[in-house]
Image (cartoon, rainbow, N blue to C red):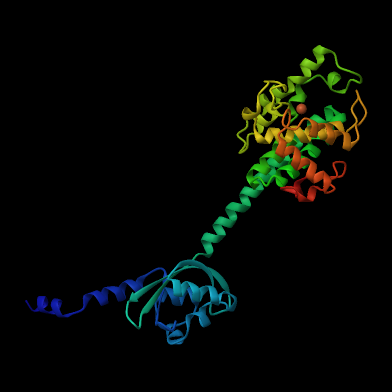
Amino acid sequence: MENNTNYKHRDYSSEWLHLLVESALDAVITMDSGGRIIAFNPAAENIFGHSREKVIGKRVSELLIPPKFRTLHEKGLRQLLRIQLTALRADGDEFPIELEVVTVRESSNPVFMAYIRDISERILASQEKIDSYKKIKKILLQTVLAVSKALEIRDPYTAGHQKRVAHLATAMAQELQLDEERIEGIFFGALIHDIGKIAIPADILTRPGKLSREDEYYLKTHCFKGYEILNAIEYPWPIADIALQHHEHLDGSGYPQGLIDSNILLEAKIISIADVVEALTSHRPYRPAIPLEEALLLIRSKAGRWFDKKAVMACLSIFKRGYRIDDPDFSKLPLHNSL
Ligand SMILES: [Fe+2]
């Protein structure tokens, strides 16, 4: 009976609240409307390295936030936002936090509670994830380059061809402002687009003079062969289809499938232009190199019929700005350190 009376008169809610705050794993800091600390829980003492006696009455922004982040912190406090910030420990170390500010007492003199979580480990884990993704991508690039090299050992006339095509196609994709992921796909796809030539007899690849009809037919199978080789690997980009489609034309006059515009990947459309410009301006056993101006005139004359108009314009623009196909700057490419 007596207990029931006590139950009615004691304010259990504030005791529970106190217990909750004291035992919380996140730092909980209570502030008055001027941002001065009025309560500081044990987790806050642990995260920031200050004892509660030392911080009561001090401003949060002056004590716990590095000077360069104070404006952002004050903005978060005013707008009652959940934000990520950099905080300051007692020993001067800066560390990342997630901060959420809520109003506890709505009145002319409100009290704010800041819930603060130390997210150093979360940030570290996501950085490690990014690093390992980059490492895998680098290994992937080195593998692609090794395969590309294998082809060039067999066919010295095309040595460097795939690299130069990759460079030009990437520059065109950047000019077209494609997203980064797609640009990387174009770069990787171009580096290995002729891999199917590994299945073509070296004699056909390196023979001077015009090829017979039969040899030409055989040479054209390199698109299918490339597709067969690359389709077995689960790349994050359509690499196998790029190898298959890089000789297709918008009007259906290309090979090996005679695809028309809407059925050809943009990646393949870009690489096909870079491929033609690079091939025409390089010496081949069956013909000398053609001047760059002539090669550019040819792709311009085929814009809209063979080649995508926007991709042609992108190609012409970068050459107009001084792009050098004979001396490409690989330092501006994705993962250039591996090249
Ligand atoms: Fe090709």
On screen, residue 330 above or below 164: below
Estimate the x, y position of residue 242 in percent, counting from the top left: 68, 31
Q: Nearer the viewer, residue 137 or 313?
A: 313
Res 70 seen here: yes
Residue visible at 84% across and 34% down in the picture: 297
The quarter in which the N terminus is drawn is: bottom left
Res 22 seen here: no
Ligand 1 visible in quadrant = top right
On screen, residue 260 above or below 38: above
Res 268 → quadrant: top right
Estimate the x, y position of residue 332 in percent, counting from the top left: 76, 50
Residue that protrudes farthest toward the left in the picture: 1
Report whether 144 appears left or right of 107: right
The quarter in which the C terminus is drawn is: top right
Q: Nearer the viewer, residue 109 or 43?
A: 109
On screen, residue 54 above or below 289: below
Res 194 → quadrant: top right
Q: Nearer the viewer, residue 169 or 302?
A: 302
On screen, residue 304 above or below 37: above
Estimate the x, y position of residue 130 in percent, counting from the top left: 60, 52
Estimate the x, y position of residue 5 in percent, counting from the top left: 10, 78
Disc tally is 0
Residue that protrudes farthest toward the right in the picture: 288
